Each structure stands twice: as C-alpha cells, then as structure tokens.
Image: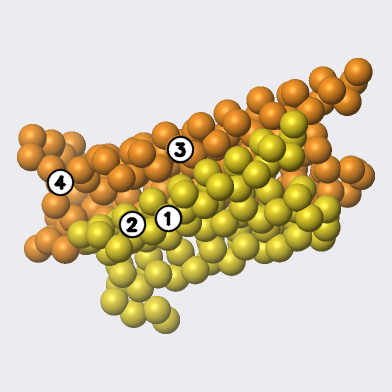
Amino acid sequence: MIDAVMYFLAAGVGILGLAALYRAFVGPTATDRIVAMNMIVTTVVVYILIFVYIDGNYFFIDVALLFILAAFIVTLCVLKFLREGRLL
Amino acid sequence: MLWVLRDILAIIFLLLGFFFLAVGIIGLIRLPDIYNRLHALGKCDTMGTGLIILGMMLLVPGMTNVVKLALMGALTYTINPVMTHIITKTAYVRGTPMTEGSFIISTYYEEDEGEFFVGEGD
C-alpha cells in the first residue's frame, strides 16, 4: 500500500517539477525565474526523501539537508546580484 | 495493528503534503503577477514540504534519522518565509510591474527616503 503511494508521489512530484520548469522557461522577469528555481529545489528535496524510502538507504537524508542549505545560499547570492548589480 | 495505524497516518500526511505542493504549483502557473505567485507559493511550499517531512518521520527507523528530519523541517519552516520576503523586496526594489488594477501602499518609500521607489521596470 505505502509503496504504491510512494511511487505515485514520485511521479506526481516529477510532474510538479516540470511545471515549475515551464514557469522558469516562460516567466517574464528574473524574479519569476528565481521563484521557479526555488520551487524546483523544493521538489528535488521531496524527491530525495521519497527515494530514501524506496531505496532504503537512509544516508540520503543528509543530502537533502545539504540541498536545502546550499539552495538558500545560492538564492541569497542571486538576489544580491540582482539587487546591487555586483556580488562582492 | 499499530503499524497499520502508523502507515495510514503517514499516507494521510504524504498525500496532504502533495496536495499543498500541487496547489502552490497551480498558483505559480496560473496567476498573472510575481507578487500573486509568491502569495500562492510562499505558504503552500512551506506547508507541503513540512507535511511530507512529517509523514517521512513516521516511516524512517531509528532516532537519528527522525532527528535529522526534524532539523530539516525546522530549517524549511525558517528559511522559506525569509526567502519569500527577500524575493518580494527584491522584486519591489527592481520595479517589477504589477497587473492592471493593483496599487501600492508604500512603507519602504518613507523609510528609505525615496531610494527604493519603484524603478524603471524590469
């Protein structure tokens, strides 16, 4: 039962990530693309968690944790570049 | 019996989290403006990820994995609203145009003496 739910979630979250990728492709401004990138990161984190259960390898939780932190730093850097025109 | 109850509770949390993520993505696709999209996504993203992490906390074995997942949930619930705020303020400072019929009640303009007024457009 729960395996079927996990496979359904994997397929559904993949479709959601592709929809966010559509917004990143179409989106008229730069901040739209940043929002879409943020959402893609969220879907990838959820996908890693689903993969943790399906594969049974629980060390990938650390990968998801690092993914959240790295995406936060990357988004901060891109927003600072957009706002001030330089990074340092 | 208790395992069946745990599985049912985990399935409820996971599907509810997926529902919130799907609603946020629909808002991201269909709404007309960056501010509207952030309004839809900034809440549904946090809620969906938190519920999915809560559902996974019921499924993983061992106390270490549960604590790691709780740390992930705490980080998500702190980082996502901060990021939504920063993205919104950056869009405002850059002068991203709004849709027709919306208006600004400006608080940044008085604080920063006109430095952050809506610019020339994106």
Based on the displayed image, in which of its 4 quarters is residue A28 positioned?
Answer: bottom left
Classify 10 Å Cα crowding around label 4: few (below 14), some (14-19), many (20 and above). Answer: some
> How far apart are the alpha carbons under marks 4 and 3?
25 Å
Q: Position of residue B43 (x, y in %)?
A: 45, 36
Q: Which residue is mark 1?
A: A18
Q: Colour of chain A?
A: yellow
Q: CA distance from mark 2 to mark 1?
A: 6 Å
Query: Which quadrant would residue B56 be assigned to in this image?
Result: top right
Please tell me which residue lies in front, B115 or B87: B87
Nearest the viewer among A12 and B2 is A12
Q: Could you say which disc has been placed on residue B50 in the image?
A: none
Q: Chain of mark 2?
A: A
* Residue A33 image point, x, y percent: 33, 61
Look at the numbered discs 3 and 2 and tell me whether their residues touch, using CB distance below 8 Å.
no
Mark 4 is on which residue type? Met
Residue B98's disc number: 4
* Position of residue A51 in the picture relative to residue A86 (left or right): right
Residue at image location 69% in from the left, 29% down from the top? B11
Q: Which residue is mark 3?
A: B22
According to the picture, the residue beneath numbered tag 2 turns out to be A22
